[in-house]
Image (spheres, rainbow, N blue to C red):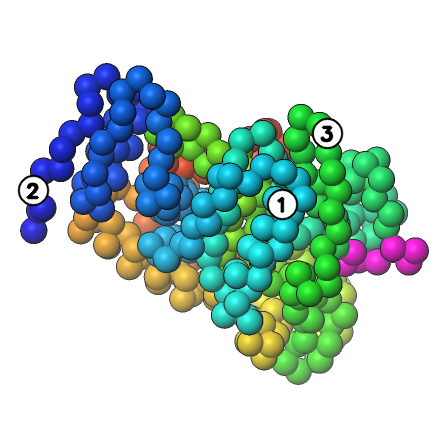
Amino acid sequence: MTPSAPPAPGRDAPAELQRFLELYAQETGGAADFEPGVPYRPTTDQLTFAARVAWRNSARCVGRSYWPALEVRDLRQVTEPEAVFRELQEHLRRAWHGGRIRSVISVFGPGVRIVNDQLIRYAGYPDGRGDPRNQSLTAQLLALGWQPPAQRGDFDVLPLAVQTDAGNQLFEWAPEDVQEVGIVHPELGDLGLKWHALPVISDMELRFAGLKFACAPFSGWYLGTEIAARNLADQDRYDRLPDLARRLGLDMSRERTLWRDTALVEMNRAVLSSFDQAGVRIEDHHSITRQFVAFEEREKAARRRVNGQWDWLIPPVSPATTPVWSHSYREDRTLTPGFFHRRRKSGCPVHGN
Ligand code: ARG
């Protein structure tokens, strides 16, 4: 059932604005009017639609089936660092939701940016403590005046740097802002590890209709493999598979005992069961890939092409056991509405996040 054709936006709208307004009208039935000659300012409803479609278009995200439920906070009037930080605390509260995590994006006004690539990050120190991925961010925050704990640990939460023309301002999270889950293996018990419950990406820009929102942090909930197969397992991250293999009593004398693989699966079991025990929402790679395939079907039915990057959509554990393995995807790197990296980061461009 096609609704009657919505009014087309004015002829002299720049192409990207025109395309966006047409998409908005087509999918929501909302009015595509804009005033020629006046700078375009999206309504809250248009901003909400744009942020949801930006998620739907995210080629690397396997969790996109939830895109229509993204909660969009229109904070375009907020640009002062203190106010931005207070709203980010509120973002964390709304997203956390007592463990029943919700997907949230907060869109701030112009002239403000977040320096950190995620709101919650653990410090990485030169002696190898903490998360090595965050060594340069940690050095940058130390240079801005951050006082690390007297006893430096592996899971010291970094402060947030908010940047404006006036410079950078540091903010410390309150303990209740940062929800974490201790990792307990179902048979071995406490592994002395933990991870934060909310991944909040804060270095990507929301683009649509020819507009850019440089400060628009967004968050969902974790897929177990992100923590267990990458953050805690990668040799250039926490590198904890050898420890776990020893605790499991595995034969590590030769590669072909596959102790790494056994430890990897056990780490994944530990992360999933710990989040479950703590009542914190988390996804497993078998369920999320099935949901992704259902999303592909819905997109097909809506006559839309799924934007995808296969090497990001497959999970790093048992990829060939999941339905995305045998699917192929095409990526349009310029598709808008979309989320784009504001700057090039050092490190692997493919598996950097
Ligand atoms: N892989 C990143 C991390 O481990 C998070 C990326 C976003 N993930 C998500 N489930 N929304 O922190």
Q: Which residues are magenta?
A: 149-156
Dot 3 amino acid type: Gly
| Residue indicated by mark 1 | 83
Instruction: Kindly tell me whether mark 2's CB lies below 8 Å from ligand 1.
Output: no
Dot 2 amino acid type: Ser
Dot 1 amino acid type: Ala
Horizontally, residue 295 falls left or right of residue 164, namely left
| Residue indicated by mark 3 | 167
Q: Earlier in the sequence, mark 3 or mark 2?
A: 2
Q: Residue at x 76, y 65 (%)?
A: 243
x, y percent for residue 169: 74, 38
Q: Residue at x 31, y 17 (%)?
A: 37
Q: Nearer the viewer, mark 1 or mark 2?
A: 1
Kindly report the distance in space between the C-alpha atoms of the residues bearing marks 3 and 2.
51 Å
x, y percent for residue 225: 55, 60
- Nearest the eye: 195 or 168: 168
Q: Earlier in the sequence, mark 1 or mark 2?
A: 2
Secondary element at tag 3: strand
Horizontally, residue 336 falls left or right of residue 23, namely right
- Nearest the eye: 197 or 251: 197
Query: Dot 1, crowdedness within 10 Å: few (<14), some or many (≥20)?
Result: few
Secondary element at tag 2: loop
Residue 312 position (above or below residue 5): below
| Residue indicated by mark 2 | 4
The answer to whether any part of residue 57 appears in the image is: no
